[in-house]
Image (cartoon, rainbow, N blue to C red):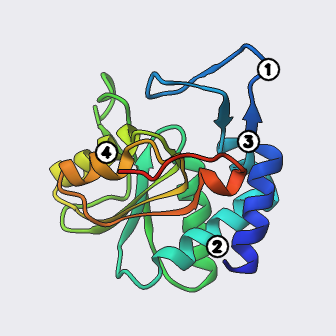
Amino acid sequence: MTDTEQRLLELLKQRSFKRAAPGEMFTLTSGEKSEYFIDGKMTAVSSEGAELIGEVLYEWTKDLGIDAIGGLQVGAVPLITAAAISYARHGRPIEGFWVREETKNHGTKKLIEGGLKPGMRVVIVDDVFTKGGSALKAAQAAREFGSEVVLVLALVDRLRGARALFRENGIENYARVFTIRQFGIDVPDDV
């Protein structure tokens, strides 16, 4: 683990990781109930967090020959922005994009916002994978648009089935910077 990743993990633990009060549970996007919750946006919207996330995403993706980085709105937007700024800092242009939950019913009526173009090689990012549904939705939209998804990447994987969902849908290149085990949660191996 790099020093930047170590500091990001510490910040995620401080700002984003929450345990439910005794007898209470969080409801996750996947519909599952959980005794803990990770809200990566709380780290991504801090100045230090944004800088660290951008650098970590840059380091994980810089050798993939990608043209764009994107994900599902709202959660991926700060990650995309942080990565785009880091790419610029390293003198490497990259486009950012995000996929809406549904096509706009006004204006240009887009499903995908940003600089994505058919034929681009892209990475899909998310703050947290549980089942992987949000990242899969973004990856499918990018594919349907004519882009090549070369990697799906999360800051944290809760190890609850994302890997299997991606494989079932033809996405073999999947990675995570951290797993929930690094937050002190003991879970069985992911499928």
- Comes first in the chain, label 4 or label 1: 1
Spatial distance from mark 3 to mark 4, Cα to Cα?
A: 23 Å
Look at the numbered disc 1 and give the secondary structure of its residue: loop
Give the numbered dot on residue 164.
none
Dots 4, 2 in contact, CB < 8 A? no
Q: Judge depth for marks 2 and 3 and give the one in front.
A: 3
Q: Quadrant of the N terminus?
A: bottom right
- Residue 107: give x, y in percent of width and height: 33, 30
Q: How many marks?
A: 4
- Residue 140: give x, y in percent of width and height: 23, 47
**Which sits in the foreground, 177 or 95?**
177
Residue underneath mark 4: 136
- Residue 106: give x, y in percent of width and height: 33, 24
Residue underneath mark 1: 21
Instruction: Work out whether residue 45 can be spotted.
Output: yes
Q: Residue at x 75, y 35 (%)?
A: 18
Q: Residue at x 47, y 40 (%)?
A: 130
**Res 83 quadrant in image:** bottom right
Residue underneath mark 3: 17
Would residue 164 appear left or right of 22 to someone viewing this image?
Answer: left
Would residue 120 appear left or right of 159 to someone viewing this image?
Answer: left
- Comes first in the chain, label 2 or label 3: 3
Residue underneath mark 2: 55
**Which sits in the foreground, 38 or 40?**
38
> The residue under label 3 is which amino acid type?
Phe
> The residue under label 1 is which amino acid type?
Ala
Q: Quick check: 140 above or below 89?
A: above
Spatial distance from mark 2 to mark 3, Cα to Cα?
A: 21 Å
Q: Judge depth for marks 4 and 2 and give the one in front.
A: 4
